[in-house]
Amino acid sequence: MYNGVLNKQGLFTSKGERKDFIIKRLHHTLQHLNNYSTKMHKNDFFQIIYITAGTGIQYIDLQAYEVKQGDIIFLNTWQQHSWTYNTATQGYVLSFTPSFITQFVSDHLFVHDLPFFRRFTAHHLLPLEGELSTRVQITMDRMLNEYETEHGEYMNLVRTYLLEVLLLCKKEIDKITQGSTNNIKSNELVKSFESLIDKHFYEYRFPKEYAKVLLVTPNYLNALCQKIKKKSAGDMIRDRILIECKRLLIHTNLSASEIAYQLNFKDNSYFSRFFKKHIGVAPDEFRRR
């Protein structure tokens, strides 16, 4: 049996050996850490947490999500996250590198392209109900039993179970997404817009700049964003900039003026006005809080 320990530096056994995959019961992990709350941090691996009992709060990129039985949480490698769970919380926690799956599938971008692991995704948390919840829990249990009892001899079977969980959740999200819009091309265009924002928000600040790259008009792009995301294209750009502002204020020692320069604001006073307008407090006050 692998006696794996999860920590924010990576996936390691009790002997300090790096692994591509570890699964544990959530309450064992919480007891081992002797802490039902963690500080904000990033992982260098992908993580899935499935709640089967209890409640708690999962923080992802400064957003708080209440979690309960049946919720499955997806954490990628570029998100800041932490949790606060109660002592009754149970479930499973899986941690793995993309290579663990790509040894089994030919597409090396398979994991990164899953809707809940994409950059700028809204699918951090997925509530599972009824038959789907039961099926995922059974698969998780089989995965854990195989991992623990076979000494890793049949890791391809573990990969199969993990792949089943990933695809079941993808199918559910696709169903939700397709239910909200019948125009798949429109949905793909908005996804491309989100991807472009994440790559170019430092330099492109206006919808017309993204619309030019996407070969559509700014009005058309804005209408699609309003229809699919319930917010304007400009709001989506602004929200991404604000997330980065908050990250830098909380997780670095950069001054407000240095952050303004790094994020390509014309000067510190403009950055401070922008931040206070949308967050309600000045950058330095936000950092102190």
Image (cartoon, helix red, strand yellow):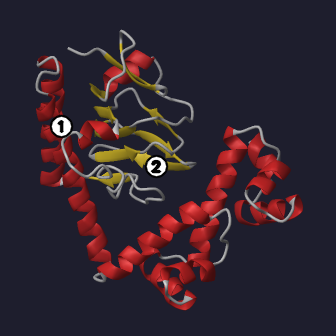
Quarter of the figure that contains the N terminus = top left
Give me the disc on residue 159: 1
> How far apart in space, not on screen, are marks 1 and 2 (Cα)?
28 Å
Residue 25 in percent (x, y) is at: 27, 26
Residue 243 in percent (x, y) is at: 62, 55
- The type of residue carrying mark 1 is Arg
Labels 1, 2: front one:
1
Query: Residue, x 85% and y 51% (percent of image)?
Result: 257
Q: Secondary structure at mark 2?
A: strand
Query: Up-down: is 226 above or below 283?
Result: below
Give me the disc on residue 65: 2
Query: Residue, x 56% and y 66% (percent of image)?
Result: 197
* Residue 49 visible in the shown view: no
> How many numbered badges does the structure rendering display?
2
Is 70 situated left or right of 190 in this image?
Answer: left
Residue 41 in percent (x, y) is at: 55, 35
Spot the residue most to the top: 15
Give me the disc on residue 175: none
Query: Residue, x 71% and y 39% (percent of image)?
Result: 252
- The type of residue carrying mark 2 is Tyr
